[in-house]
Image (spheres, helix red, strand yellow):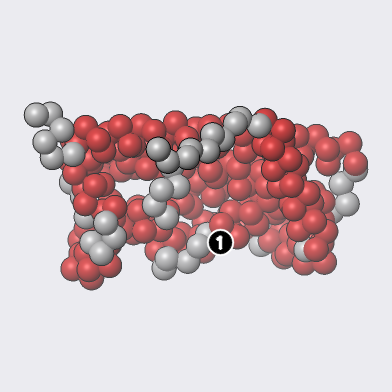
Amino acid sequence: MEDTIEVKNTPWLKWIAAAAVVVAVVLLGRELSGYIKPFQEWVASLGVLAPVVFVAGYGLAVVAFVPASALTLAAGAVFGLAKGTAYVFVAAVVGSAAAFLIARYVARAAIEKRVEADPRFSAIDRAVGSEGRKIAFLLRLSPAIPFNLLNYALGLTRISFRDYLIASVGMLPGTLLYVYSGTLVGEVASGVELGRGLLLGVGLVATAAVTIYVTVLARRALQSAHALDEPGADQ
């Protein structure tokens, strides 16, 4: 009989990890303090064009397969939590919609060669064929497949463009977490008071906990859907 190792639930490890994340964000804010304020001033100088420039740049980054996590953090630092989340969500929807349409109508052959090499694509294609909107929504909640790759991959499936856009709501939890982190970075860089900094830190931990919980639920649902969709599963 092989030995098995039982991993016990240790809540204190989760709290240590959460505290480490907050400390890392605070240190990042201090490290970037000399850059964030000038950047905020430059964005402010754009006036009403600032959100337009941000959304356009973010959308182009998504289409070009450029990781947009840094831009998401910057949105929190520059625009704050509410506006930053709104701008990032709109930009992500615009960029992902453009990638979807490119994959479906413009560069399908080239995208197929890149995406079909990933073994996860066949599973996505089968699952989307039966429950397109639901599967796309769960994929948005779960980081199982990189965001930029998923945009193009879904363009090759049978999901309708309408359902694809509706499923974009699944991007909100992750967007909120990144923007919140960027907000804390911006506050620290601006010399936030200790009390407000602690309050933001607690909020970041709570947001991260909810996001992780939602991600776990989405991953389980995807696994269940994949198991049911396996050939011969209903026999």
Q: Is residue 1 left or right of residue 198?
A: left
- Quarter holding residue 49: bottom right
Q: Residue drawn 58% across and 41% down? A: 176
Q: Residue drawn 48% across and 38% down? A: 4
**Quarter of the rendering occupied by the C terminus:** top left
- Judged from this view, the residue extending furthest toward the front is 1
- Judged from this view, the residue extending furthest toward the left is 235
* Closer-to-camera residue (153/121): 121
- Quarter holding residue 230: top left
| Residue 70 in the image, given as x and y percentages of width and height | 60, 60
- Badge 1 density bin: few <14, some 14–19, many ≥20, Cα 10 Å: few
The answer to whether residue 194 is seen in the rendering is: yes
The answer to whether residue 107 is seen in the rendering is: no
Against 14, is 51 above or below?
below
| Residue 30 in the image, given as x and y percentages of width and height | 83, 59
Q: Is residue 61 left or right of residue 71?
A: left
Q: Which residue is mark 1?
A: 53
The number of callouts visible is 1
Against 35, is 52 above or below?
above
* Closer-to-camera residue (13/214): 13
**Secondary structure at numbered mark 1:** helix
| Residue 105 in the image, given as x and y percentages of width and height | 20, 61
Task: Look at label 1 and name its amino acid.
Answer: Val
Q: Residue drawn 11% across and 36% down? A: 232
Against 53, is 162 above or below?
above
Q: Residue drawn 90% across and 43% down? A: 193
**Quarter of the rendering occupied by the N terminus:** top left
- Quarter holding residue 44: bottom right
| Residue 126 in the image, given as x and y percentages of width and height | 19, 44
